[in-house]
Amino acid sequence: LGLRGLISGKLTRLGRLEIGVAALECRRASFCRWPGAPERVCSGSRQSLPHEVPAAAAARGAALLGQGLRGPARRGEAAGSSFSAARERCAWQCLVFGDKGVNRELGQLILALQGTPLAGFADFLREASPGADLRPSQTTPKILDALTLDNEKVVERERERGVPESSELVKGIFFVLCWTLDRLYEGRPIPKFWVLETVARLPYFSFTSVLHLYESLGWWRTPQLRDIHNAEENNELHHLLIMESLGGNNEWFDRFVALHAAIGYYWVVVVLFVAQPSLAYNFSHLVEEHAYVTYAQFVEENEELLREIPPPPIAREYYVNGKFQTSRREDSKPRRRPPCDNMLDVFSNIRDDEFEHILTMAACEKWWAGDGPTPVPSSEQSSLGKRADWVQWSEEVNALNRKPASQAPTLDA
């Protein structure tokens, strides 16, 4: 009852938990059917419920459930399988439709379809989803509309640097991805970067997923390699958060494209990693190379404008106070701590981060192919203990000469 009162008093005012209210009414009705249930609760006394759920909210929630629920069940009503089924539907639909993220995306889809040939479908969704959040998305700062990105010059830069060697299959998938993004996001660099960063995180999820599987099966264990991929994913995550702070994910269409492409990309990399890890790393090498060249061109085109824009707090927190992925360096060299005074510094840092990813992916690719040293930094290779220390420890343990408990002398002896 305390939880029910908290929800009704705090959250129903937000208009997002009306279904949850109906589910709690279902729970109360079930409790009232128990023999010996307190009369003051089952009678619906207002004195025992200081945060009573508004009747209108309960009615709307019951209508959304759509299974004949009309508020609190009357005490003494016969319990049966129909109520159990209704209660299960309550829990499931509360879980799905009560989620604010689902309601937000439904509302943004409805708004995106208005004024299009699918406006009739938008009206249908509006009627079928009364809990949809129809508030308009945030607007992008106008100064960001002046940012440009010349895709032709990006291609020229890639030709000058040279595309890394790869198989025809990987090259085909990579060029289709780049061509599609260039056409979809012509003249919209920030949303394009947000999509790129959303997709760029997924290979590291793929790598660690397969490595976890191999460890679970007892085939292989290299936690240092997973630490590298976790650091890279965390770096891409902060790139993503920076792009979100600039409004890169404001449009429903951009979120739809990025999230579905990310799911497909995840499984593509999983299959490649299982079949041949060097191919998966080669694919990521191509993507990181493209990201580096794209950011380099973007920084050069917009240098003066980016210098005027202050950095978002997430960028300051990450680059000034946080941890970020760096390439393999000698232990004697200090870790990079870049400036973060304006958006020019931020995008320059992101560009340099992508170059670090290139080095790491190239090292992993060569190592798996048997053509290079381990990508694990020398300072981390002994994170589980040096070989000499293990040998010394084993000798010390084996030198202990205490008799087993079964051979110890007894009182009878």
Image: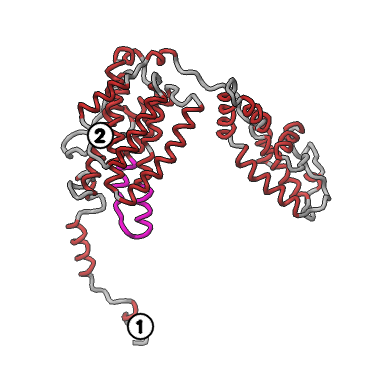
> What residue is drawn where x is 30% and y is 38%?
171
How many residues crowd around disc 2 within 10 Å: few (fewer than 14), some, or many (20 or more)? some
Residue 10 visible, this orientation:
no
Instruction: Locate residue 163: give its quadrant.
Output: top left
The local secondary structure at tag 2 comes to helix
Q: Which residues are magenta?
A: 208-230
Marks 2 and 1, how far apart in space?
A: 66 Å
Find out whether residue 210 is within the magenta segment: yes
> What residue is drawn where x is 75% and y is 31%?
56
Residue 338 percent location from the top left of the image:
26, 26
Image mark count: 2
Residue 294 percent location from the top left of the image:
30, 25
Q: Is residue 362 left or right of residue 14?
A: left
Residue 170 percent location from the top left of the image:
31, 41
Q: Residue furthest bottom?
A: 413
* Residue identified by numbered label 1: 410
* Residue identified by numbered label 2: 356
Q: Where's the N terminus, which quadrant?
A: top right
272 and 36: which is toward the camera: 272
Instruction: Locate residue 187: give its quadrant.
Output: top left
Residue 199 percent location from the top left of the image:
39, 35
Q: Is residue 240 left or right of residue 38?
A: left
Residue type at mark 2 is Glu
